[in-house]
Image (cartoon, rainbow, N blue to C red):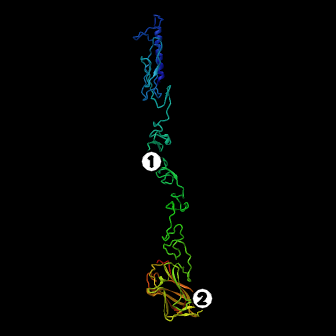
Amino acid sequence: MRNAHGTATSAILFGLGLVLAACNGDDQGDSAGSESASGSTGESASASASASASASTSDGSASTSDGSSATASASATASASGESDSTTGSSDGTATTGDTATTGDTATTGDTATTGDTTGGASITDTDTNGCPEGTEGCPCLGDQSCDGDLICDAGTCVQPGEPVCGNGKVEPGEECDDGNLDDLDGCTSECKEAPVCPQGSEGCPCDGELCDMGLICMAGTCVVQPAAVCGNGKVEPGEECDDGNNQGFDTCDNACKKTNFAMDPCGFAEDGIWLDIEYKNAGSPYSPKWTYSATPGFGEAQWAPKGSDWPEINLKGAVKMNYNDPFGTVCDIGSGQWLRIMMGLPTLQSYEKATVCLVGRSISVGSSVTVLLENPANGYCGAQVSLSNSWWADPMGAELPKNCLTPGNDFQALQITPMGGSSHLGLQRARLTFHKPVF
């Protein structure tokens, strides 16, 4: 296999041979220089100049870029002065001299050029053996910076950028940031724009439970200004001790939503409503006990009065009398077949949670207790019963009446106290009726 250098050498040797032949064949012995053997100028062309044709392409291969044979025409031309022109390599791989004369020899390589440079017949192979230059579209890349122009590196390949997707964790063209979420308060918004970080606990910023700055509360995961509490809506809000859903100030939660410390009646029932109390300890007649009412604005003596009266009254059956000599103290003596009624009206009472009755007294007997019925004659004698002992000391006993046995809105009814079992003889010192958590 010949290369381009071998062809050029042959051409030079051939030219030297022509010069020697010309010199030896000159039997005329002219010493003044040879006359022109050809050409209209009369100049003598000596065959002493040879041209070496070396084909060199722009990428340094010994053949053309498509691997075809490179032809070099070497021409030996003699000038009148005897100087020879040098040959030059053209871009198409054809070796020519400065003049137009050519030799008959052709320089041809039989090899196919690779993508590497060829210098002096030695081939240097390029590292891009797959024909895909790094950084160009569709070719390998190492990060966006290694791609040309606006191309981006996606899965190790340079590609055209698509529409950015905010929230995928990748900062794409047109995005200032992308933290992989759509939270607007963490420094990168849901539109992938940079924004100040919202400190936890500040107004309008995230919160966890009650971790908000002073004057703020945590609502739906955000710190907001604490709204004014609404007392009576049934919800215990900031600044409230309680909220029982009403505007009554006489129960366990007053109308300022502060807890109240009510006392208990003698039977242990809380004074958390409206109540009336009769006491015979210093009374002069069964009709005139001491009356006491709960301190509840809007429901006093007049609101307890039955229709046609200005205050509640006592109604009796039988020879009910005062007993000033009982060991327990002064009592109202109610014997068998007798009863005492506390007459009342409740026209402004709308509802209540429960009603309780507490009796303080004893069985007037030497050997047995007394069973007492607590009833409402106006409602079918519904009620309850209690049992008091015959001890000589205070023996309070209480009971809860059936729901609405004493009827809200009814303006003429009564609580009837009747001894009916055991000794059937009651010494009553005190009685209290309470409507717990009423609405009126």
Can residue 380 be seen by looking at this rendering? Answer: no
Type of the residue with mark 1: Pro
Pinpoint residue 261: horizontal percent, then vertical percent.
56, 76
User: Distance from label 1 to label 2 (Cα)?
Assistant: 91 Å
Pinpoint residue 118: horizontal percent, then vertical percent.
49, 28
Q: Mark 1 falls on what kind of element?
A: loop
Q: Quadrant of residue 381?
A: bottom left
Q: Residues within 10 Å of mark 1 (few under 14, many from 20)?
A: some
The residue at the point 48 percent across, 16 percent down is 13
Can residue 91 be seen by looking at this rendering? Answer: yes
Single out the residue that lies furthest toward the bottom: 319
Relative height, residue 8 to residue 148 (above, below) = above
Say whether disc 1 or disc 2 marks the residue closer to the N-terminus.
1
Q: Mark 2 falls on what kind of element?
A: loop
Q: Nearer the viewer, residue 206 or 331?
A: 331
Type of the residue with mark 2: Trp
Circle 1 residue: 164
Relative height, residue 239 to residue 2 (above, below) = below
